[in-house]
Image (cartoon, rainbow, N blue to C red):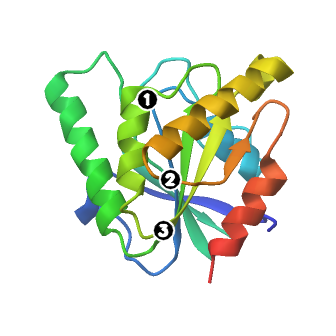
């Protein structure tokens, strides 16, 4: 799959504000600062399509990007950001779960996990949630350029184990937005989900 055209469509704080379900959707989900925006920019070959930040918790809305006039890429709010109240974090979690479980146009979920750390408790919660999602799911290991070969192998093992514990057998794609690693494989997987 090649990406020729990408347009930002809208931000939505809740389901009622989202675009009509006329196009298939690919969701990018992960904890705050895992590299969702950087991955989106890499896949779409844009420098600042999705705003990246060193400050976690910047994406607080569902951001919809129309790709090739055929689908939406959806940048989902990051979970687990510590500097907001427990109430706001619980709200985000409910909204994310609601989106994953009830959005009929959702065809694929890319669950991003930072390769430098074992999956967090919240990552594992999302993995459990993915067992009930009707869309195709892929686990995306981010920032692998920061690890040596041996550490990447350990990271893959750790993620595989977490997935197995949740009863999941998902494809795992190791990525680096800086080195454009994993781009081709992810685009192939995304392309295969689009009717």
Image location (x, y in percent) of residue 174:
74, 39
The residue shown at (23%, 64%) is: 16
- Label 1 residue SS: loop
Viewer-proximal residue among 65 and 86: 86
- Label 3 residue SS: loop
The residue shown at (79%, 55%) is: 185
The reply to whether the C-beta atoms of the residues labelled 3 and 2 are less than 8 Å apart is no
Q: CA distance from mark 3 to mark 1?
A: 26 Å
Crowding around mark 2 (Cα neighbors within 10 Å: few <14, some 14 to 19, many 20+) is some
Image location (x, y in percent) of residue 11:
40, 52
Going from N to C along the chain, the mark reached first, 2 or 1, is 1
Task: Name the image quarter holding residue 136.
Answer: bottom right
The reply to whether the C-beta atoms of the residues labelled 2 and 1 are less than 8 Å apart is no
Point out which mark residue 58 bears. 1
The residue shown at (59%, 54%) is: 170
Q: CA distance from mark 3 to mark 2?
A: 13 Å
Q: Is residue 79 at least partly visible in the picture?
A: no
Task: Name the image quarter holding residue 38.
Answer: top right
Crowding around mark 3 (Cα neighbors within 10 Å: few <14, some 14 to 19, many 20+) is many
Residue placed under numbered mark 2 in the picture: 168
Viewer-proximal residue among 10 and 117: 117
Residue 34 sits above or below residue 147 on the image? below
Point out which mark residue 114 bears. none
Residue placed under numbered mark 3 in the picture: 135
């Amino acid at each position: 799959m090649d990406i020729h055209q990408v347009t930002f469509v809208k931000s939505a704080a809740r389901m009622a504000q989202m675009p009509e379900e006329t196009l298939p959707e690919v969701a990018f989900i992960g904890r705050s600062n895992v590299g969702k925006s950087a991955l989106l920019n890499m896949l779409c070959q844009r420098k600042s399509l999705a705003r990246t930040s060193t400050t976690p918790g910047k994406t607080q809305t569902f951001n919809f990007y129309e790709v090739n006039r055929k689908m939406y890429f959806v940048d989902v709010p990051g979970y687990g950001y510590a500097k907001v109240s427990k109430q706001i974090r619980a709200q985000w979690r409910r909204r994310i779960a609601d989106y994953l479980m009830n959005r009929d146009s959702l065809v694929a979920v890319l669950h991003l996990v930072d390769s430098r750390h074992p999956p967090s408790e919240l990552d594992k919660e999302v993995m459990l949630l993915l067992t009930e999602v009707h869309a195709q799911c892929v686990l995306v290991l981010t920032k692998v350029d920061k690890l040596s070969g041996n550490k990447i192998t350990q990271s893959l093992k750790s993620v595989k184990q977490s997935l197995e514990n949740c009863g999941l057998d998902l494809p795992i794609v190791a990525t680096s937005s800086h080195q454009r690693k994993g781009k081709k494989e992810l685009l192939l997987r995304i392309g295969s989900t689009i009717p």
